[in-house]
Image (cartoon, rainbow, N blue to C red):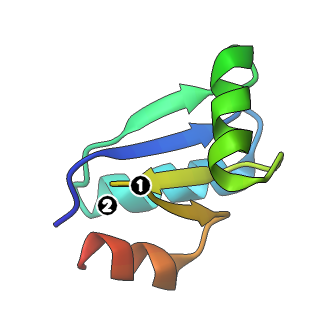
Amino acid sequence: MAGDVKIYSTPACPFCRMTKNYLKEHKIPFTDINVAADPKAAKEMVDKSGQMGVPVIDIDGNIIVGFDKNALKAALGI
């Protein structure tokens, strides 16, 4: 099971909502970081992922871009 899970997201992003719902379904605690409201967090997200798009999920340093169920399952051990 993963330890530290962060999701960089925006309120209007449907794939962000899908990712957060998926994590909630599997009872995975996560920190939601709104990059629309936090420019410093947005820069951190781009530095980690090389991507401007959301969601970016950081699972113990393993970066997943977008709502990728298979990558999430593998990284979370579910």
Residue at the (34%, 41%) spot, across then down:
30
Indicate which disc residue 61 carries: 1
Would residue 68 appear left or right of 20 to someone viewing this image?
Answer: right
**Which residue is most to the front?**
47
Q: Amino acid at mark 1?
A: Gly
Q: Quadrant of the C terminus?
A: bottom left
Residue 7 position in % (x across, y down)? 51, 44
Residue at the (67%, 54%) spot, across then down:
49
The total of numbered circles placed on residues is 2
Pick the front one: 6 or 46? 46
**Above or below for 77 versus 31:** below
Residue 10 position in % (x across, y down)? 70, 33
Q: Quadrant of residue 15?
A: bottom right
Q: Are marks 1 and 2 in contact (CB under 8 Å)?
A: no
Pick the front one: 78 or 58? 58
**Above or below for 1 versus 49:** below
Q: Amino acid at mark 2?
A: Glu
Read off the residue under disc 2.
25
Counting residues from the N terminus, which is met first, the one under dot 1 or under dot 2?
Answer: 2
Indicate which disc residue 13 carries: none
Would residue 51 appear left or right of 47 to someone viewing this image?
Answer: right
Q: Residues within 10 Å of mark 1 (few under 14, many from 20)?
A: few
Residue 11 position in % (x across, y down)? 69, 31
Residue 72 position in % (x across, y down)? 43, 72
Considering the numbered disc 2 on the image, is that residue within a helix, a strand or a loop?
A: helix
Considering the numbered disc 1 on the image, is that residue within a helix, a strand or a loop?
A: loop
In space, the residues marked 1 and 2 are separated at their CA atoms by 22 Å
**Which residue is most to the left?**
1
Residue at the (24%, 78%) spot, across then down:
77
Residue at the (74%, 16%) spot, across then down:
39
